[in-house]
Amino acid sequence: MALIDAFFARAFKRGELTVIHPDGSTRTFGTPDPDFPPVTIRLAKGVALQILRDPATGAAEAFMDGGLSIEQGDIRGLLAMATASNLWERGSPALAGTALGRGLASLRFRLARANMARRAKRNVAHHYDLSDRLYDLFLDADRQYSCAYFTDPANSLEQAQADKKAHIVAKLAIRPGMRVLDIGCGWGGMALYIHAKTGADVTGITLSEEQLKVARRRAEEAGVADHVRFELIDYRNMSGRFDRIVSVGMFEHVGTKHYRSFFAKCRELLTDDGVMLMHTIGRAGGPGVTDTFTSKYIFPGGYIPALSEIAQGYEGLRLFCTDVEVLRLHYALTLDAWYDRTVAAKDAIVALYDERFYRMWTYYLAGSMVSFRYGGLVNYQFQFARDRHALPLTRDYIGEAEAALR
């Protein structure tokens, strides 16, 4: 049996995978499963070694370049079949690459992990300064590019994203007249929502010039530019005091060496009775490394933190961690919706970029989805306060405020 066949035999247990090798020979792996439609792939010469060396990146690049083509099913189905048979909580090593491949990936990550201020803006631009049209094609109308909150798995993406904003703002206990800072404000949706629902004045900051243009335009069009302002500035250079700070989907770009500086800066920016809500992707396990595909093609400089790494960032800073919530499957549902919309918009995306970009983007979304559904990724929502009396004694106020916001 060829090494690649042995790899597929270990990795694929649920659902049927048929592999057509470069010489035309065919092998089928796994067993039929109603939850996983059959998938057939064709491998070009050299792709087997590419996958064995580093399964995730090797398969991604082979798929992007056409060396791995899917003749039945799609990339989401292929990745779901592989990861469902190797659940994170079972600790299966079946999808691990060679020791050399893992070592090189770790070395590359450690060399690139320092996310200094001069590099942060460039890293952000790599992903967020893509065409506005691309994001319009797969996000909700408010352009919420982070995990939605599904009170019911059957809810639409629009409903789940609206519920996410309500869930977060309820935790912040914002009152009219407060000053709110949104770190990593994206296209302005959260900041505009906060002002509309609470009457607070909001300052949103971003390192993406494209996002800044859209956010400012939206504030002008809504007639609230005097109360919702957006600036192109690194959080490290921010000054002033704010009653509330919110940061959604930005912490993944801070860099582990800067966690302590990030939390210290946030504490400095908070008023004495200030409250902060941070929403971030996190690892269910311990510290790790960013995979090569993600750091090379999607989020250069990005890193998904472990709970222990986040805790080390704020420990000793006299900042109360007043609430932690773990969202397990919400991002999988969000990514499923984004993937479906991306596939539906294939012609438009290929026209914007090319076929290779489209394949890269679908691999990114599908790979992210399976990491939340079957792998070791979750979302964390942390609430912090400078004063132990800043928030009510129990969490009951969150549900009450959330219901009112909805």
Image: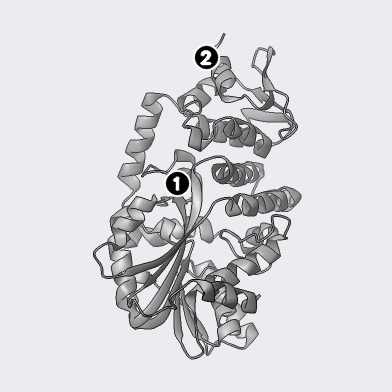
| Relative horizontal placement of residue 217, taking residue 157 as reference (left or right) | left
Residue depicted at x 65% and y 17% = 21
| Relative horizontal placement of residue 315, taking residue 176 as reference (left or right) | left
The image quadrant of residue 48 is top right
Please give the residue where the numbered disc 1 appears in the rendered image. 284
Q: Name the spot of residue 119 as percent of width and height, x first.
A: 36, 58
**Residue placed most toward the observer, 318 or 195:** 318
| Relative horizontal placement of residue 258, taking residue 356 as reference (left or right) | left
In the displayed structure, 141 sits above or below 7; it is below
Q: Secondary structure at mark 2?
A: helix
Residue depicted at x 73% and y 60% = 156
Mark positioned earlier in the residue sequence (1 or 2): 2
**Residue placed most toward the observer, 400 or 375:** 400
Q: Name the spot of residue 79 as percent of width and height, x first.
A: 61, 35
Could you tell me how far apart the alpha carbons at marks 1 and 2 are, in whole angstroms? 31 Å
Q: Quadrant of the N terminus?
A: top right
Asked whether residue 140 appears in the rendered view, the answer is: no
Residue depicted at x 28% and y 69% = 264
Q: Quadrant of the C terminus?
A: bottom right
Q: Residues within 10 Å of mark 1 (few under 14, many from 20)?
A: many
Q: Given the current orientation, which residue lies at the most extreme left position?
A: 316
Find out whether the residues at labels 1 and 2 contact each other: C-beta distance under 8 Å: no
Q: Secondary structure at mark 1?
A: loop
Q: Residues within 10 Å of mark 2 (few under 14, many from 20)?
A: few
Please give the residue where the numbered disc 2 appears in the rendered image. 3
Q: Which mark is residue 81?
A: none
> Closer to us: mark 1 or mark 2?
1
Residue depicted at x 33% and y 57% = 311
Residue type, label 2: Leu
Number of numbered labels in the structure image: 2
Residue type, label 1: Ala
